[in-house]
Image: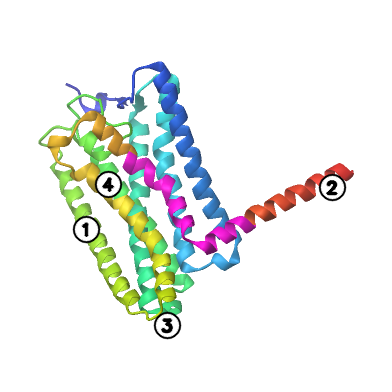
Amino acid sequence: MSNSSSITQFLLLAFTDTQDLQLLHFWLFLGIYLAALLGNGLIITTIAWDQHLHTPMYFFLLNLSLLDLGSITAVLPKSMDNSLRDSSTISYTGCAAQLFFYFFCASAEYFLLTIMSYDRYVAICKPLHYGTLLGSRACVHMAAAAWATGFLNALLHTANTFSLPLCKGNALGQFFCEIPQILKLSCSHSNLRELRLLLVSACLFSMCFIFVVVSYVQIFRAVLRIPSEQGRHKAFSTCLPHLAVVSLFVSTAMFAYLKPPSISSPSLDLVVSVLYSLVPPTLNPLIYSMRNWELRNALWKLMRDALLKEKTARNLLFNR
């Protein structure tokens, strides 16, 4: 038995005890991390560089990419470092920081996805009022509200979780620090406060989910009333990437936290945690760029200009 004042570090769940497989785990996670950095970094750079993409939809997409980078950075580097050092430990403060930053980015991303559904609703159902309802100041305020709400939500949960006395050891059944695993280590009579706070957050997330569903019901009704097939296709093409990202984000998280205990096992929980923590930040840039010709064209233009500048610089250097 131990209490929280005597715990200086936590033990994370290792993927394997074999050194060769640990190196494979490192290289696999490194590939995923670099893919997420490259994809989200290209989207951020392209939107910031191309003036034609300075619209509400792409402004929110830029914020989404920033949050994706933050969430995956909160989780992966420590896991890769442990694989290289053949370790499974994380300090008490490091665990608190990891939990805070991941929960902050994930919460803010969910709120931002809700705002993005409102953006698509106004664009399709109220196009004449789009400039009024989603002006630059309104977009900044909505994005700031998503970030601030995510920050406050993460701060409350982190402070409350790490104020609980821990009396069931320091081994976490997860490869990164998250609230349910730390609650399992707390004294059974002392975690009701955090459970109530989680219930409030669940109600807030449920309201956001209902808002997204209602928005898309209205969007689909409006799209089906468009007389031309080309118009319907164009309207759907602007909504499907966002809908795919929301579905990926919500489905993986719901399966992780709401799956029946009868099918739960350490190996399955580990695989599911990888799905909901690493897959969405990595695939989101691909989902948004596949069906968005404006973003693809801007990206190719950016890469072409970068190659031309590099070629010009080489020629100048060679001529000298």
Distance from label 3 to label 2 (Cα)? 51 Å
Q: How crowded is mark 4: few (under 14 residues within 10 Å), some or many (20 or more)?
A: some
Q: Residue 315: where, in percent of width, then height?
A: 83, 47
Residue at the (55%, 51%) spot, across then down: 42
Label 4 residue SS? helix
Tell me if 53 is positioned left or right of 131 in this view. Answer: right
Mainly helix, strand or loop, the magenta region?
helix
Q: Which sits in the foreground, 132 or 244? A: 244
Residue at the (33%, 58%) spot, across then down: 111
Circle 4 sits on which residue?
253
Circle 1 sits on which residue?
206
Magenta range is 275-301
Label 3 residue SS? helix
Circle 2 sits on which residue?
316
Sequence order check, earlier mark of 3 and 1: 3
Colour scheme in use: rainbow
Q: Can residue 48 be seen in this view?
A: no
Q: Quadrant where the N terminus lies?
A: top left
Q: Quadrant where the C terminus lies?
A: top right
Q: Mark 1 or mark 2, which is nearer to you?
A: 2
Q: Which sits in the foreground, 71 or 315? A: 315
* Residue located farthest toward the front when viewing the structure as drawn: 229
Q: Mark 3 or mark 1, which is nearer to you?
A: 3
Distance from label 3 to label 1 (Cα)? 30 Å
Residue 297 lies in magenta, yes or no?
yes
Circle 3 sits on which residue?
128
